[in-house]
């Protein structure tokens, strides 16, 4: 009886442990995919933009990126797209603050730090929190290829 | 008339020989242990692959960052000079996670019909991590203007 109880307890603990490992791996993989997707989404938008501006949203650990293009008729810079860290810990995107198209990825972003120069946007750090609390960090950069020869 | 379980020859078993044999218990235990160990190994291996691909994703993003950064530099920049490979660390949030290098080579564009002339620069960015084995290395290549 004691032996049978020990065996059953061992099987239950193994089951719980394996389920925990399985869930941790799955949520970690999801967060990694979201980090890659977020960087690719930002890069795709940056590459077709003319100018970029980094804003604090609301602080230097949680920033935003405003992308501009030159209007072909007026020849002035107009905002085309923006990414910003919102109060729900998600990075939202849209043509403007008043036109929120929703979060770029579903994972919570704990840090979103960017930098920009005349021709490059550096995604210094994208830090996502996986479902089990682990952090996924990634960084990259994208060039502003739509600068052309005109400057306003 | 006595009734009860029979042995392999059809006669009744004595009361003391009822139940599961020791050999059956041993075999069942060995099979169960093998199954559990294999299952545990598969979970561990899966977790290991997830961790490995985390670094692979970081490495791909780092290679793209290097390539994009190089694409913004003038052709005369030191980073785009043909010759010895340039090397450096890949850091994320101040932590070194991989090694990167990039090589700039002459490239003869076959489209112009002239053999042996240099038309472009071929830049190959390589990022390695872990044990720096071929399965832990990735490369991106892009052609840059010569001038």
Image (spheres, grey):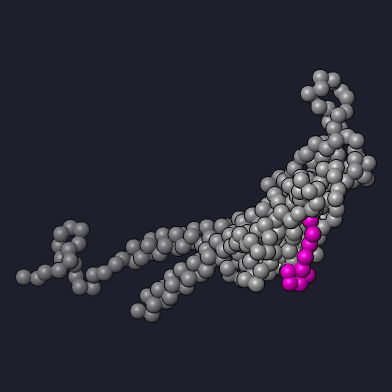
- Vertically, is A103 above or below B133? below
> Where residue B71 sits: x, y (%)?
83, 44
- The residue at the far bottom in this view is A2
Residue A27 magenta: no
Q: What residue lies at 78% left-to-right and 39% top-to-bottom?
A: B142
- Vertically, is A128 above or below B132? below
Front one among B134 and A11: B134
What is the chief secondary structure element of the magenta stretch?
Answer: strand
Front one among B27 and A145: A145
Image-based side of B134 in relation to A88, left or right: right
Q: What residue lies at 76% left-to-right and 40% top-to-bottom?
A: B141
> Where residue A61 sits: x, y (%)?
75, 70
Tell me which corner region of the image, top left, top right, bottom left or bottom right, holds residue B123. top right
- The residue at the far front in this view is A74
Magenta residues span: A52-60
Residue B136 seen by the camera: no
Q: What residue lies at 78% left-to-right and 62% top-to-bottom?
A: A54
Q: What residue lies at 39% left-to-right and 77% top-to-bottom?
A: A5
Tell me which corner region of the image, top left, top right, bottom left or bottom right, holds residue B139. top right
Tell me which corner region of the image, top left, top right, bottom left or bottom right, holds residue B45. bottom right
> Where residue B112 sits: x, y (%)?
82, 22
């Amino acid at each position: 009886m004691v032996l049978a109880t020990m065996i059953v307890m061992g099987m239950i603990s193994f089951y719980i442990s394996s389920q925990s490992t399985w869930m941790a791996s799955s949520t970690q993989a999801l967060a990694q995919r979201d980090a890659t997707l977020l960087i690719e989404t930002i890069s795709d938008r940056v590459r077709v933009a003319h100018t970029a501006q980094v804003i604090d949203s609301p602080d230097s650990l949680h920033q935003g990126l405003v992308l501009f293009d030159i209007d072909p008729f007026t020849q002035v810079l107009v905002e085309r797209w923006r990414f910003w860290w919102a109060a729900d810990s998600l990075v939202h995107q849209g043509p403007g603050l008043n036109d929120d198209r929703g979060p770029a990825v579903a994972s919570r972003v704990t840090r979103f730090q960017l930098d920009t120069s005349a021709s490059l946007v550096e995604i210094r750090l994208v830090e996502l929190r996986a479902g089990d609390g682990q952090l996924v960090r990634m960084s990259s950069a994208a060039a502003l290829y739509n600068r052309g020869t005109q400057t306003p | 008339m006595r009734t009860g379980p029979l042995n392999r020859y059809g006669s009744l078993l004595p009361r003391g020989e009822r139940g599961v044999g020791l050999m059956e218990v041993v075999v069942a235990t060995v099979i169960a242990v093998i199954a559990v160990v294999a299952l545990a190994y598969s979970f561990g291996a899966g977790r290991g692959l997830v961790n490995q691909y985390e670094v692979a994703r970081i490495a791909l993003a780092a290679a793209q960052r290097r390539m994009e950064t190089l694409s913004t530099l003038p052709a005369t920049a030191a980073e785009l000079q043909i010759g010895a490979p340039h090397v450096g660390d890949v850091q994320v949030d101040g932590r070194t996670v991989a090694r990167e290098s990039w090589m700039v080579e002459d490239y003869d564009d076959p489209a112009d019909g002239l053999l042996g002339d240099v038309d472009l620069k071929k830049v190959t960015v390589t990022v390695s991590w872990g044990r720096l084995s071929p399965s832990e290395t990735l490369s991106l290549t892009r052609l840059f203007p010569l001038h």
